Amino acid sequence: MHSEAVASRSTEPRTGTGSSPTIDAVSLAIIEQLQEDGRRPYAAIGKAVGLSEAAVRQRVQKLLDQGVMQIVAVTDPLTVGFRRQAMVGINVEGDLDPVAEALTAMAECEYVVMTAGSFDLMVEVVCEDDDHLLDVINKRIRTLPGVRSTESFVYLKLKKQTYMWGTR
Amino acid sequence: MHSEAVASRSTEPRTGTGSSPTIDAVSLAIIEQLQEDGRRPYAAIGKAVGLSEAAVRQRVQKLLDQGVMQIVAVTDPLTVGFRRQAMVGINVEGDLDPVAEALTAMAECEYVVMTAGSFDLMVEVVCEDDDHLLDVINKRIRTLPGVRSTESFVYLKLKKQTYMWGTR
DNA sequence: CTCGAAACTCACGGAATCCGAAGTTGGAGG
DNA sequence: CCTCCAACTTCGGATTCCGTGAGTTTCGAG
């Protein structure tokens, strides 16, 4: 074998300014493969990106260890019994962090992000039913110290949800 | 073996009103296993949920075929080169669907959902840099016919992102 | 009640995959 | 120049995957 392929030891770490653990093109290609099918065999991936099976295995392991990616099953919440979801915009007075931490600790919050704009925080909440949702928003979020106000956007229909980062 | 485990054929389909393909407790347990590790061997899953390797294999295949779940690699967008993300709230006049469809077709839109509340649609946009983000919002979203107004929430810090549905 | 379908178990065997270990290579730094 | 290290390759044995076929149990329809 002598695939002229992508591989070359320390080539082009240069993904711009460089985040912490910079991902090179080969790892990117591996990730793309696994975004198509998380169970794709290492050998097949290796063929696609021009690396040996073992090398792919080592890279994947490292990517997992570093927390750059994870291989998981994702589902449509509706089909697994969570029938109420909402995005909640939150305004906070004072320090954002404690509020963000508290939200992060709540199992119902799938997604917590600090934002610029008319909300300080946005949180995606996944609940079993209306009562559950009401409880989370009114009893657990709005009562957090520092929370000034919230605005809820109940999901009516999820139109798209992908995991194709890098695959463009 | 005779794990008293979860298994029993058609037990409790009753997830309330019942979505289309109702998921029973065993499949739920399988999904949970795969949410922890998308590459876990079928035999190991079987042991955990009280099913044979073959049965797990069949169930997983069906869940994938039915589109109930998918096994994929997920990454932190920041570490793979997408440094600007935003949630965009959109107000539409007239029919929502065409707008939603157009957004769904855009590669930069990772997440599109119809909502109740002061926005009709919420869209998560993933971009490489500010220019890219600006382009998407001003040139591609705001120009869609029917879009009355938009409001953007640029991500400052992603605090939490999980895929643990069913694992509660 | 009887029949049929669906789902599971058990067993098997070959092919494919996984995985640890050992050997190779190229570049950076002393 | 020499050494070290990280990344890669090769290799063989253990494990997993996966189709297949037979037998069992449960449920629902006729």
Image (cartoon, coloured by chain):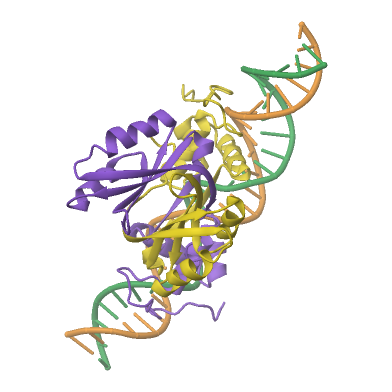
Chain colours: A purple, B yellow, C orange, D green
Residue A50 visible somewhere in the drawing: yes
Judged left or right of residue D21, residue A159 is left
Above or below for C29 versus B77: below
Q: Quadrant of residue B53?
A: top right
Residue at x 54% of width, y 81% of height: A4
Question: Residue B148, image x and y in percent?
Answer: 51, 58
What residue is drawn where x is 24% and y is 45%? A148
**Residue A57, horizontal then vertical, whole percent:** 45, 61
**Above or below, comparing residue A71 to residue D20 in the picture:** below
Count of marks overlaid on the render: 0
* Residue A84 x, y percent position in the rendering: 46, 36
Give me the residue at 47% from left, 66% from top: B137
Towards the viewer: A53 or A146: A146
Where is C21 relative to A96, above or below? below
Kindly tell me whether residue A163 is visible in this rendering: no
In the rendered view, does A16 fall on the left or right side of A76?
Answer: left
Q: Nearer the viewer, residue B75 or B133?
A: B133
Answer above or below: position of A84 versus A50.
Answer: above
Q: Position of residue B10 (x, y in %)?
A: 58, 23
Quadrant where the C terminus of chain B lies? top left
Q: Which one is nearer the viewer's eye here, B81 or A59?
A: B81
